[in-house]
Amino acid sequence: MEVVIVSSEVAPFSKTGGLGDVTAALSSALHRAGHRVMTVSPRYGVTPLDGLKDSGHVARAYLGTSEQTAKLLVHTAKGPTHVLVEHPMFADRAGIYGDQNGSFGDNHIRFALLQRAGLEAARRIPVGRKTLGESPIFHVHDWQTASLPVYLDQVYRPLGFFRDSPVVLTLHNPAHQGRLPAKMFDDLDLPQRWFSPHGLEWHGDLALLKCGVLRADQLTTVSPTFAWEITTAAGGFGLDVLFRGRFAELTGILNGIDTTEWDPTSDPHLDAPFSAGDPTGKATCKAGLQAELGLPMEKSRPLVGSVGRIDPQKGTELLIDSIPWLVDQGAQVVVLGSAHAAHQKLEWRLREMEDAYPDRVRAWIGFDERIAHRIEAAADIFAMPSLFEPCGLNQMYSMRYGAVPVVRATGGLADSVQDGVTGFSFVEPTGFAFRGALHRALKQFAADGLAAMRAEGMSRDFGWDAVVPEYEAVYAAAVEGRARLLRA
Ligand code: ADP
Ligand code: GLC
């Protein structure tokens, strides 16, 4: 198959969370399985420049108040063909979606340019010796690229391009919908008819994700449980009626993890390697992190770790509220996270915890891959009390690194952690329920150091290769659906 992944994040070029990991790993896994794959994402200010070359091609689009021209760069490594879109709207900014003042006001314009560039790259840029031809599958992700079907219909198909190409939209986080004031539609240079319930309008607003939910040929989300949750009023973020309407074309596929980057037997960030068969190095990793963070190097104290965006989604408040209790139960707590401008208060509360319990609590504020790896390796218990979680990657990293996850049974957490076998889960989103699950974990730690559960979790396979056939089936259904539509 020929697949074009258009996404606002592809690691290592860009990543603020799981989206970047997933588009990178999926494109590699598809490539390994023999498909011809291109990714198209922006070259941001943070994107490393090594290996990027000008392809000689550009994408042009009239957006905002003038014509924008973006250069299409290609990354020259082996594997899938990575195209990076070069434009000052991406490159000359401090952040990916926003900065300390909040989200950028022109994100709808920036990502319209990305989508136009994605279509142009698919036409022009070779993958191997030739381009992807007339009917590649477009695989788009979240609100940033969800309106690509409109640009296909409005700009490319009338010229005879990509008539048979279907679009697959993956929902990583439908809490973010690109729902904006109606007047921003004028910046997109689209005929007024697209501002309608069948296109980009929803309750009088510009609604970028909603457009893709209606117009993509197939929808996927990143776990089976979440696919069901979003069809309910409680879990649908206001779009549940649309998800119910498209249930026949909605598939939940649990993400994999990159088992090369996250491998405790060869991870360069760790003080010692370890494995399910020989877990002794994990104690060295724990001592190493305690030393680095200036915590007492106490072997027998349970170390509870957490890594993730500081955000209400992640249940950060439940975690913060439970820290005094965890300390009282004898635990050390290490939290790594960074917050969007809107959630800075949670960051301050974490710092207050660190001040209140200097021998027991560390809050590392910022985005730091190395510390993320070191926490997974050092932790006995990993806390992930998310209020909702489409998939979640850290609980899978945790199991692989022998940190027993304590999770809320929601979305991908429910699908990947087996209560009492590979981790502990709780249902009600309350501190009481969370502490109940933590209590069970601490009790098991006191009994056998969590050795049996750790071994169980470490033996699970969360690699991507097993996931590929599920995407292949969705791509095939999308091709078939598009063909049926054209025949009708
Ligand atoms: P989400 O995409 O909702 O943020 P996921 O669990 O799917 O959640 O993915 C988060 C990814 O981002 C993981 O790879 C995690 O290790 C990483 N991550 C999140 N916050 C940080 C941070 N502060 N420092 C380093 N890595 C982080
Ligand atoms: C989103 C979700 C997370 C998921 C990730 C990758 O950011 O919040 O649960 O793992 O996307 O699909």
Image (spheres, helix red, strand yellow):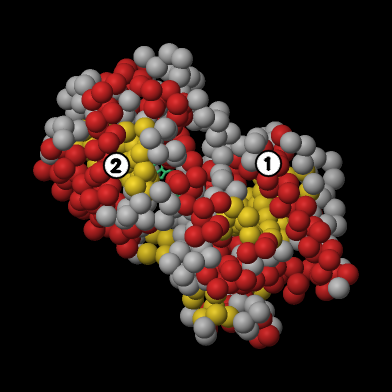
The image position of residue 154, as x and y in percent, is 74, 74
216 shown above or below 349? below
The image position of residue 50, as x and y in percent, is 58, 38
Residue depicted at 63% across the width and 55% down the height = 251
Decide if residue 317 is on the left or right side of residue 73: left
The image position of residue 175, as x and y in percent, is 46, 64
Residue identified by numbered label 2: 437
- Farthest left residue in view: 356
Determine whether the residue tagged by mark 1 lies in a helix, strand or loop: helix
Other-residue count near label 2 (Cα within 10 Å), few / some / many at <14 / 14–19 / ≥20: many
Front residue of this view, candidates 390 and 118: 390
209 shown above or below 279? below
Q: Nearer the viewer, mark 1 or mark 2?
A: 2
What is the three-letter code of the residue carrying label 1?
Val
Front residue of this view, candidates 2 and 128: 2
What is the three-letter code of the residue carrying label 2?
Ala
Residue identified by numbered label 1: 468
Which of the marked residues, 1 or 2, is nearer the chain's N terminus? 2
Decide if residue 283 is on the left or right side of residue 162: left
Disc tally is: 2
Determine whether the residue tagged by mark 2 lies in a helix, strand or loop: helix
